Image (spheres, rainbow, N blue to C red):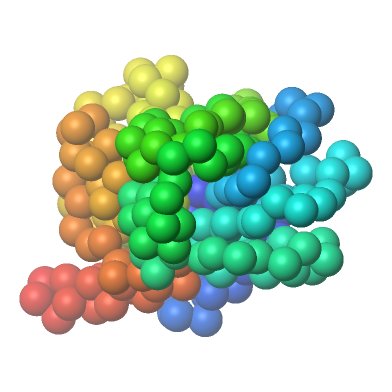
Amino acid sequence: MNVAVFRPDDERLSAAVDLLTDLGVEPVADPMLAVEPAGATPESAEWVVLTSKTGVELAARGGWEPGDAKLAAIGPATAEAASEAGWAVELVPSEYSSAGLVHDFEDRVDDAAGTTVEVARSDHGSPVLLDGLRGAGATVNETVLYRLVRPERAGKSVDLAAERDLAGACFTSSLTVEHFLDAAAERGVRDAALAGLSEAVVGCIGHPTRETAEELGVEVNVVPAEAEFASLAEAVVAELGVVGENA
């Protein structure tokens, strides 16, 4: 059974391929995201929010240091990357999402009024984080560390979906969904690819990704309880087993 994975072409894709193989399916590695560094580093603030491992690595490569700033990281992978860079992380939200970080930030800071927060991330970050922090009374600045673009060769999973030869798909962000459908449109098979996905097990790493997928006409079957790729892959493969038993 072919299961598509759309992670960037680095160690994340390799790890995803290995995991899907171990779970007993045939991984289709089709990176839908590539990183273009913006050449920026985080601005000074009382709190600095880092939203991805990529952002941490780019900031460290640019020579940035947190100094007296407190660090917040969305998710354990981001926190681990920060730790490897030698930075102490003050806050990792219990829910690995922008909304989760806003909630935990409000609980942790008694009086957010006047607190300065720097959000350092990609050019496709959700407005939920900025709006939520500002709603808590913080003064927020956003710095774009990198842009996320679709690789030129992306799309072999699109062809498989259009040919009804894709058993599952693991979407790890709203942008992977958008880029998948953009690639399908460029090939002239958007409707066929959507039809193929409707016959596959489609998994989304979190509810924001699910909302994007459903808004674009993609039927979503599973969203794992934890917003981590391993949980997503396991949920998709488990659902494939259920489908197979009922076939």
Q: Residue furthest left?
A: 246
- Which residue is drawn at the image coordinates 72% and 33% (left, top)? 43
On the image, the x and y values in percent for residue 76 come to 56, 69
Dividing the picture into quarters, in which one does residue 72 lie?
bottom right
Report x, y in % for residue 227.
Answer: 39, 63
Q: Residue at x 23, y 72 (%)?
A: 239
Expressed as whole percent of the image width and height from the top left, the position of residue 192 reads: 25, 32
* Residue toward you, 45 or 234: 45
- Residue 9 seen from this side: no
- Based on the displayed image, in which of its 4 quarters is residue 228 positioned? bottom left
Residue 114 appears left or right of 163: right
Left or right: 96 in relation to 206? right
Give the residue drawn at x 54%, y 74%.
Answer: 19
Residue 193 image point, x, y percent: 29, 35
Of 159 and 103, the residue lying toward us:
103
Residue 38 versus residue 13 in the image, above or below:
above
On the rendered image, what quadrant is the C terminus found in? Answer: bottom left
Horizontal side of 116 relative to 157 (left or right) equals: right
On-image quarter of the N terminus:
bottom left
